[in-house]
Image (spheres, helix red, strand yellow):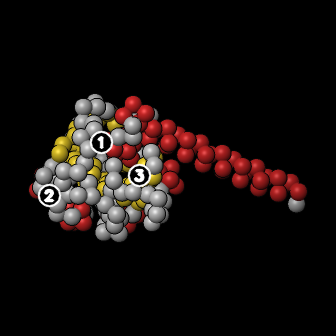
Amino acid sequence: MGARTRTERCRQRCARALLLSAVVAFSNGLGAQASARSGALSDLIINLARYTNWPTTANRTHLTVCYAQGGDLAPAAIDTSDTTTLRGMTVQWRQVQDRSQLGDCAVLFLNADVWPAPRDWVVAVATKPVLTISNYADFTADGGIIGAWRNGEDWRFEINLEALQRARLNIAAVALRLSQKPKSHGAERVP
């Protein structure tokens, strides 16, 4: 019985160490460029995209990240000058004004002040492989994939698994483990 208990404790310690390593690796990924731009929203978007897998598309040469906002988003929040590559594809940033412009978006960030409301934009891409992210308070409840909010200097997020499956996307287990439900106090949903 003693050997089995030691083995179980060893497995638990190893599992905790692996989880801690994954959290540190994901946090380092989220914070890799954040220090230079003070937690830019674009860093969060890119790092969530880094842990996302889309259905295979043979002719995809770039990853289009679209963003829509109503004017309240700080100009420095999204750094579109960054020449990031993900899985060998160049990331291209595009601001969209209307739901009809979402054709080749792989990622769609919707600021809470966007008009029409984020839930209406989500309907336009609900069955397409588009990673939807927003700081709108009820975003995941309204069918969005990732709801994000600031807690001090840190970003927090929750993932809607049903919306993720509907969009035929996969997110790495490390991101799923870091996902959490927002607390009603102390966290704000603005970039």
Answer above or below: position of 130 versus 65: below
| Spatial CA span between label 1 and label 2 | 22 Å
- In the figure, is residue 183 to the left or right of 62? right
- Callout 2 environment at 10 Å: few (<14), some (14 to 19), or many (20+)? some
Residue 160 sits in which quadrant?
bottom left
Measured from the top left, where is residue 92 in percent x and y? 22, 38
C-alpha distance separating marks 2 and 3? 26 Å
Foreground pick, 66 / 87: 66
Eye-nearest disc, 2 or 3? 3
The residue indicated by pointer 1 is 77
- Which numbered marker is on residue 99? 2
Find numbered disc 1 in the image and state the secondary structure of the residue it sits on.
loop
Left or right: 7 in relation to 118: right
Q: Residue at the spot x=41%, y=52% of the render? A: 150
- How far across and how far down the image is residue 149, in percent? 39, 55
Query: Residue 68's x, y, as percent?
Result: 20, 51
User: Mark 1, mark 2: which one is toward the viewer?
Assistant: 1
Residue in view at x 18 percent, y 54 percent: 70
Question: Which amino acid type corresponds to the residue marked 3 in the rendered image?
Answer: Arg
Q: Nearer the viewer, residue 137 or 102?
A: 137
Q: Are marks 1 and 2 in contact (CB under 8 Å)?
A: no
Q: Are marks 2 and 3 in contact (CB under 8 Å)?
A: no
Marked residue nearer the N-terminal end (2 or 3)? 2
Tag 2: amino acid: Arg
Q: Amino acid at mark 1?
A: Ala
**Residue hosting label 3:** 150
Q: Is residue 112 above or below residue 57?
A: below
45 vs 125: above or below: above
Q: Do the CB atoms of the residues marked 3 and 1 lie less than 8 Å apart?
A: no
